[in-house]
Every structure is written in C-alpha cells, then in structure tokens.
Image: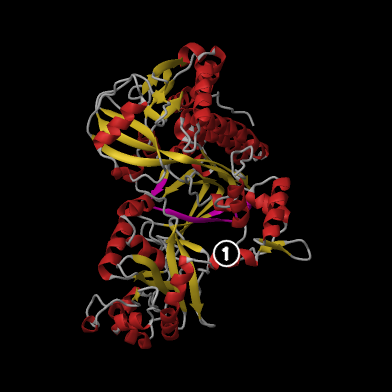
C-alpha cells in the first residue's frame, strides 16, 4: 500500500482512525478523528470518505461518523472469538443464574485481557470491564489466569514491568506476581479482591480446548463484601458435568467455575471453603491515609527524578521521590550508558557523581562499518568533545548514595496510582505503600519521571497521547565474559542486519544484533549468536566468551503531546522515548532536568511562572533534534525487513556520503556528543 511522507501505509493510518472509536466515544466528527488519530485534516477526510463508501464507517445527518454495519458483518465472518463466545455462552448463562452479578469471558490479546462477553444482573455491583475492551493481565482475575498459562518468556516480559496499579491492591511487585501465577496454576483458579476496583472481587478459571490448552478465562465479579451464594455450589461440585452440558459440537470446552472434586469440597484447597477469607469482612476498617506534604513530589527514582531532586536541593527546595521498585531493583536495572560531555560535567560539578570519570571510560570516536570496512568518526578532532561509557545503573548508584546521604526522602516500593488536581495550586499524588496502605502526597508541584508507562502522563496529556512510531526490528542484546573486541563502539551495517559492538568493562562486553521484535531470546544457541555477530562485522574479529545474559530491546519513538499542565510536568521517558542507536535516552532526560530545575526555582522561590510557561517550547526543540538524529542513525544502519536491492544500495551510498564528507562527519559527531544544555527560559 502507498506510504505517507512519514512512512506509514494507508492501512496503518486506517487502523489509527478506527482506533479512535471506543465504547464511550461512538460518534465523532472528522475533525475529532483527525486530532485523535494525529492525521492531517485532508488525510483524515480522504480516508474517512473511503471508509464510508465501503460501509466500514457510516455518516449521520449531521455528518458525524460512527462504525458501520459492514465492519460488524466482516468481524462476524469466520471469527474464532465469535465461535468461542457462542460455545461458552450456555455455561456462562448457568453461572450467571447462580451468582446474579457479572459473568465474563476474556481472551489473551497482545499482552492484555480482551473481554468477548459479559452478562450482568440489573442490581449487580461495580465492574469497569466492558465487551470489546481490555484490562491489564496482572490486575484482573481473568488476566491473571490467562497470564499464568502463557509461555514463560511472555510472563517474564510482562513481569519486567512496569506493572501499573489500578488500586492499592493491584499486584505491582514482580516476585508477588510470580507467586500469584504459581498459585493459580496450582489451584486452578484465581481470586483477586480489590485489584481492579476496591469494592469488587474477581474470581476466574481457565477455559481449555480439546487439547487442554487454555484459550480463554471465565470470571465472575462480586461486590467486595458479598460472599458467593450457596446455590453456586452445585456447579462447583459438578464441574465436568456443567462443562459437558455446555459443550457445542464445534468446540470442546472444559469450563470450570470452581475446579474442585466433590470429595475435596471441604478441604483447604476448595475455593468455596476459603472464599470468605478471600473477601473483605464487613468488620474490616479502611486503612487510614498517610498524608505527606512537600514542595515537589517526584514520581520515579530514575536518573531524571533523582537528578532533579539533587538540583532542587542545591536551591533549598524540598522534594519527595517515590518509586514502585526497591533500591536494589533500581540499582540492578542494567542499561547501556553513553554520557555526553555536558552530562558528565553536570554530574561532576554538582557533586552527583565522583566516579563518572574514574570508573567511566572516555571515547573520542566511533566506527561506522559497512561493506567489510571500518571508518572512524573522530569526535575529538571534529568537535573537541567526547563521550563517556558509564552504564545507567552506575549513575543511579551514585545519585542514590548522594541523595540518601544528604537526607533526601526517597520512598521505595511506593506505587503511584494517579495525580489529582494537576491544574490546581496544590496537586496531589495518590499512592500506596509497600503494604498497600494509601498515601497522599500534597505538593506545590508534581513531576512525572516514571518512565515510558508513566502514571503521571495520564494527568498531563493522556496515557498514550503523543507522537508515536514503532520500528519493524529490535535489538537482541547479550552480555558476555570476554575481553574488549574494540577500543570504541562499532556500528556495523551489513546485508544480514545491523550489529553493535560495545564494551562494559575489561572482562564483560555488551553486543547487539538486529532481530525481529518477536524473537525468543532463548531460541538461538551461543554458537549461532557468535556466528551472526561475526557475520555482521565482516573483516573485524570479535573476542568471544560465555554469554550470561540475553534480552530483546524493542524500538519506539514517542513524544508526549503535552509536557506541562498546570503544576504537573513530565521529564525523561515519561515525556519521550528514542531508539538507542543515537545514544540519546539518558542525556535527553538530563537536559529536561536542567530546564525544569530552572523553571521550578523561579516558580517556587520567586513566584515567577514565566520560565515554566516557556519550558515545553524550549524542551521540545532539543527533543525533536534528538528524535531526528536517533531516527537517522537507525534508518541509515539497519536493514528494513522489506528492503529491496535499491534500498540496500541507496543505504550504502548514504553511508559513503557521510564518511566521505568532513561536514557530514562533523554533523554526526556534533549530534552524538550532544548539544550544549539550554539554561535560559
């Protein structure tokens, strides 16, 4: 299909239009669609007209647009989801007749629980799940059951987080989630009190096909203080008979509301036997909310959040930093770290790090490798600047040590749930502590430094509101025990895909190869990995060694629509993400911090809001320059899955133009080593 100037196909843009419709937003104007789909008005009108002509969308008399019957008709043809729903519906109706609340059917879809059907009674309790809508796997009872029966690598990918909290009871700690998944597999069901809504409890069981594979989850949602009615027990005692009665000819479903045998009905493992203990007692009291007062509430103890707290402290501005992870988890977050010279100088001059120059390694260039030859880009000779190889977790160790020694209040294991009144003079962070007790942080200003799955961003610009691009490839990264293969980083373009040769220490090296985003990290043997790496750096011999860590890093570009609303702001990955090819991630976050520190100092010390009003405009200038450089390096060095011979030859021509021109090499060196920090607002 024809691509737009941004590289998107017509199909991709059409899907974005359809995605703007929700169960609450069923009718829209074309202008609203264009804004929500982030399309030019002319493009949106043209595509909507085509969709209306084909019947996929319909127009009313006011020229507003809704989903068309044709779309519904196509969805029903040959739909596995529809057949599953039809097969499960008789059993769902029998369950619903007994519980008289909510009975739901959900399937796994792209990392979430997608609800295919819901039966509800008129006076049923609260339930936010809707047909054709989704809930996080780790939060809902149906999602937990589905996740418990996914492949181990998919479980670990989700557990790696971040795990957003819908309520204080939502499981957000990796080890707690692993224990819950093991419990579900052992018991055959999940009981989840208050994890989606504080007033409700979800109970779910797996739905299996004829081979025993879990294909869906059946769940009931009950009021938090309500005990399951006794008349549900006949189904609990006769799970197989219930399943047989509802089994259609085309699908062998083994649906079990409570998967226990008759003889086990009164044992501790019987869900009906311990149900009362799983539900909150009416005698239980709601925990008292702890209220914390501070000048600046910072959500996220990553480099951006900790560095901001450090700079604010130098101006005498108090702050509280919270993070859902423990200190050890934060310090074990292994990420590459190429620090621009300005970042190194800031860490050093402000006392944030005393090790960056002594432990870190200065690099004065990189090698671009293609067609079997290496070409050095001399940073020092071209710009007079260099970069430092100093991993992000080492920066975090330095910042945590300095801030804690200075008495900084950092609350580990505290999960931010939402920001209330972000536009007011006193926004509040609603959170829960490691024991699930509610905490409210009242502040003069709230900063979201909580990463790409930011909770704070929901209050500023919407959780996914922004400019977004996903790439059709990823990096397969390894850590290995071996001496360095090169003194400087090697960025290698080859017909077999991209490779990056990096360093970590004298005995540990980090290397990457381009791969499919869905690659299973365990699917390649060590020999295959080394052969691929060597193939992609043709003409340069690598020092090999045992591989002790492997992972897949997806590529995304994102910039939030809004960086500030009222007295709430976003910095770092909460505001933007870039592909790692340009080594811009942490440096861009620190640049945000420098600007926001200036704005907050003026606001909180001199009551001058003008610098804050300029923050977004000034910050976005650097953000989009970094986005361009990261995209350029990525597109120039990686092989697209559908690349033609023309594309390959054009790409090699581009590389030769860069290495053959001093001006082009200087441009690359200036971008890579970083632009001076902007401090004026």
590 relative to 215, above or below:
above
In the picture, the quarter occupied by the C terminus is top right
Q: Residue 183: percent from the left, percent from the top?
A: 28, 65
Q: Nearer the viewer, residue 437 or 416?
A: 416
- Is residue 425 shown in magenta? yes
Q: Is residue 681 left or right of residue 544?
A: right
In the picture, the quarter occupied by the N terminus is top right
Please name the colour scheme applied to the rendered image. secondary structure
Which residue position holds label 1?
74
Q: Is residue 82 left or right of residue 4?
A: left
Q: Nearer the viewer, residue 82 or 579?
A: 82
354 relative to 455, above or below:
above
Q: Is residue 364 visible?
A: no
- Residue 482 lies in what quarter of the image? top left
- Is residue 117 shown in magenta? no
Q: Nearer the viewer, residue 206 or 415?
A: 206
Residue numbers of the magenta segment: 410-428
Say what secondary structure mark 1 lies in.
Answer: helix
Outermost residue, front side? 645
Q: Is residue 479 left or right of residue 402?
A: left
- Residue 266 lies in what quarter of the image? bottom left
Q: Residue 307: percent from the left, percent from the top?
A: 46, 36
């Amino acid at each position: 299909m024809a691509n737009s100037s941004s590289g998107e196909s017509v199909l991709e843009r059409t899907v974005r239009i359809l995605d703007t419709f929700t169960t609450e937003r069923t009718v829209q104007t074309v202008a609203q669609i264009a804004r929500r789909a982030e399309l030019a008005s002319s493009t949106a009108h043209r595509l909507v007209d085509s969709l209306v002509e084909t019947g996929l969308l319909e127009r009313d008399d006011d020229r507003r647009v809704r989903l068309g019957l044709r779309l519904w008709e196509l969805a029903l043809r040959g739909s596995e989801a529809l057949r599953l729903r039809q097969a499960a519906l008789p059993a769902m109706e029998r369950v619903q007749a007994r519980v008289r609340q909510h009975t739901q059917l959900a399937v796994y879809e792209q990392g979430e629980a997608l609800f295919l059907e819901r039966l509800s009674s008129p006076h049923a309790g609260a339930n936010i799940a809707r047909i054709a809508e989704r809930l996080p796997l780790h939060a809902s009872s149906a999602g937990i059951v589905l996740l418990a029966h996914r492949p181990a690598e998919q479980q670990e990918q989700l557990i790696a987080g971040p795990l957003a909290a819908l309520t204080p009871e939502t499981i957000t700690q990796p080890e707690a989630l692993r224990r819950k998944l093991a419990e579900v597999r052992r018991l055959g069901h999940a009981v989840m009190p208050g994890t989606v809504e504080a007033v409700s409890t979800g109970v779910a069981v797996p739905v299996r096909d004829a081979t025993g594979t879990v294909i869906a989850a059946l769940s009931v949602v009950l009021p938090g203080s309500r005990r399951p009615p006794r008349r549900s027990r006949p189904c609990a005692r006769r799970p197989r008979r219930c399943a047989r009665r509802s089994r259609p000819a085309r699908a062998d479903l083994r649906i079990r509301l409570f998967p226990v045998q008759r003889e086990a009905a009164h044992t501790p493992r019987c869900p009906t036997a311990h149900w009362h203990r799983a539900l909150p007692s009416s005698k239980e009291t709601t925990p008292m909310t702890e209220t914390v007062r501070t000048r600046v509430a910072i959500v996220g103890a990553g480099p951006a959040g900790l560095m901001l707290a450090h700079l604010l402290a130098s101006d005498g501005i108090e702050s509280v930093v919270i993070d859902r992870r423990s200190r050890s988890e934060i310090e074990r977050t292994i990420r590459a770290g190429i620090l621009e010279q300005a970042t190194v100088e800031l860490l050093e001059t402000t006392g944030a790090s005393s090790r960056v120059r002594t432990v870190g390694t200065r690099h004065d260039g990189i090698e671009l490798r293609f067609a079997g030859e290496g070409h050095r880009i001399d940073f020092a000779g071209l710009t007079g600047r260099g970069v430092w190889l100093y991993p992000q977790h080492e920066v975090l160790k330095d910042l945590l040590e300095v801030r804690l020694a200075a008495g900084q209040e950092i609350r580990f294991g505290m999960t931010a749930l939402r920001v209330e009144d972000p536009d007011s003079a006193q926004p509040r962070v609603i959170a829960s502590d490691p024991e699930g007790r509610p905490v409210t942080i009242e502040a003069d200003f709230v900063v979201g430094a909580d990463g790409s799955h930011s909770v704070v961003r929901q209050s500023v610009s919407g959780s996914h509101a922004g400019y977004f691009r996903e790439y059709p490839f990823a990096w397969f990264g390894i850590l290995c025990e071996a001496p360095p293969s090169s003194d400087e980083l090697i960025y290698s373009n080859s017909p077999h895909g991209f490779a990056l040769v990096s360093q970590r220490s004298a005995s540990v090296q980090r290397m990457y190869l381009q791969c499919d985003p869905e690659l299973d990290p365990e699917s390649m043997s060590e020999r295959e990995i080394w052969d691929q790496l060597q193939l992609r750096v043709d003409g340069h011999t690598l020092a090999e060694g045992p591989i002790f860590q492997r992972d897949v890093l997806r590529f995304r570009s994102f910039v939030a629509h809004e960086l500030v609303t009222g007295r709430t702001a976003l910095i770092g990955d909460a505001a933007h993400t870039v592909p790692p090819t340009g080594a811009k991630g942490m440096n861009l976050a620190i640049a945000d911090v420098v600007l926001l520190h200036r704005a907050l100092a003026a606001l909180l010390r001199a009551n001058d809001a003008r610098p804050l009003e300029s923050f977004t405009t000034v910050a976005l200038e650097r953000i989009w320059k970094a986005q361009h450089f990261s995209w350029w390096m990525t597109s120039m060095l990686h092989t697209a899955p559908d690349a033609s011979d023309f594309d390959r030859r054009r790409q090699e021509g581009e590389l030769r133009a860069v290495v053959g021109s001093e001006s082009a090499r200087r441009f690359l060196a200036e971008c890579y080593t970083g632009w001076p920090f902007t401090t004026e607002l």
